[in-house]
Image (spheres, helix red, strand yellow):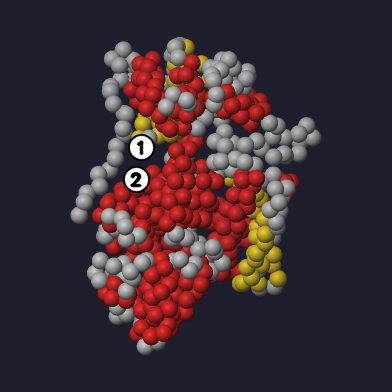
Amino acid sequence: MARFPILGFGDRVGMRADNVPEHITYHVNLFGPFEVITSEGDVLHLPSKRGRALIAALATGRKRQRTRDWLQDLLWQGRGKVQASASLRQELRLLRKAFAQADVILSEHGTLTLNPDLVTTNAAEPLATTSGEFLEGLDLPAPFDSWLLEQRAALSAPCASQDGVERTSPEPPTGEPIIYFNRTSPDQLDMQTANEVFQCQIEKGLADLAPLEFRYTSDDSVAADHTLVKTQILEAGRETLLRVVMPGHSNGQSNWTAHWRGMQQDLLLYDDDELLQLAYRAQEAAVDALSLSETRKNKISASLLGFRALRNIFSMDRPDLDQADSDLQAAYERVPKGIFLAWRAFIQANLIVESTDLDPGHQAHLSANLARRALQSEPENAALKAAASHVFLLTGQDPIAAGELARDATALNPSNPLAWASWANAEIAMGQLETAAGYSRKALQIGRFSRSRHWWEMQAGVSAALVGNYEAARVHSRMAHSLVPSFRPPLRYLAALEQQRGDGEAVDTLKDRMRDLEPGFDMSDLSEPEYPSGNLRRAGLA
């Protein structure tokens, strides 16, 4: 089995200069004239205007990070990729020489980071506490000039009016969308806690998917320009009603609402499948609202690219998958979030099953490497761990490790259907078929109203076939095929199930449909070890 080494820092080379005290640190002032002040009170001279702009761009980035490609486009657009890359490398050498410390700027996986152990900034300080214009006098050609104007406009937008009423906050420096939360509950502490836990579950699901900004408000007027998620708890005797509302706003998004009714103790335990389903439905509704809002604003962000990719990932159509992979690469260049790597790994692993024109060994190596890189960057991301578990199974990795990743994912976010489906697949690989069937049913229950329902239906169909419940397998496979006719796995299962039942006419019809997607398909292919039908063979259907 191929080995995949842990990747280390790419440019973190060199030693601290002998004449620089080890305790020295730096503060970057972004308001008024750009300055770098050492912990000893000296002003550090940076001779290059682009060098100062590079430090400022890093200081304002999410986690003080920017990708190399983003910086090259900002500061050297028009020079060509090779020349821009060389210019960035030269500027980094000059900066490290000026700071006399090689590790003031760290580089890893195409991303540059301003070292938080050595550098502080006033980028996050409220405008009222600072003096001077943002990056006063630091002017460079396009597109830097446009970026600078956007930053100044965002920082100068008022957050509150003179009457003290809270107003909509400005766009965050990252340019990523904002989502607001509002909750109302009875006065009892347990109900307030339950509401907070439920809302945090929605936030967790969204934060796993994209680098969003989250804020809390008691003012519904933010819904005019932003996505607002309101959760309300009402009591009626021993029963409790949990209601989720997303008010419509000026961009044309209609009002969305859903609710759960049940016993109070079920709400407090947060262990009811319909409650988990509601959290997932709210998450998907928020993604739809954010996507529409950002599209109407003609804004491209890492979050929007990630959401657009997510719509295509589960379609299993090759053009959709290629577009999703391209969107995820672009999203990662804007914000290096691990989930974007994990979804790319997910796509490449699924192509092993769905595309016969690709080298499976190369695909396995590529997808497993992407998954490992993703796991290093976001170890508590439930969606990432669920996707990585799926990848590990498809690429022949240890099923126990895949199972642990999926179990972690269900613990981190029990309302993620992919986490339960991945755990089911890991249990199948370890021969725990009844357990797998239970996890598959849970994934389907949570994701029943999602746009990816065909995926959860197919998972339930596979598990049903493995435990010998062929009729349930047939029902689930039919549903999956009806929802996405180009999805091949349900066609394979339906053909095998109808052949097992002796319905030759149905088998011929299904073979013709498969040949439209996979020219030359024959039922004998299902019994071939190289063909992606291992669970069909395990179920005795091929």
Looking at the rendered structure, the number of numbered marks drawn on it comes to 2
Kindly state the secondary structure of the residue where label 2 is placed. helix
Quadrant in the picture for residue 460: bottom left
* Residue 365: percent from left, percent from top: 28, 51
Distance of label 2 from label 1 (alpha carbons): 9 Å
Q: Which residue is mark 2?
A: 373
Query: Which is nearer the eye, 540 or 132?
Result: 540
Please say if the residues under marks 2 and 1 sit with CB atoms less than 8 Å apart: yes
Q: Amino acid at mark 2?
A: Arg
> How would you rate the neighbour count of disc 1 (Cα within 10 Å): few for under 14, some for 14-19, many for 20 or more?
some
Q: Is residue 44 above or below residue 73?
A: above
Q: Quadrant of the N terminus?
A: bottom left
Q: Which residue is mark 1?
A: 109
> How would you rate the neighbour count of disc 2 (Cα within 10 Å): few for under 14, some for 14-19, many for 20 or more?
many
Residue ID at (39%, 55%): 346
* Residue 252: percent from left, percent from top: 71, 51
Query: Which is nearer the eye, 461 or 119?
Result: 461
Query: Which is nearer the eye, 129 or 440?
Result: 440
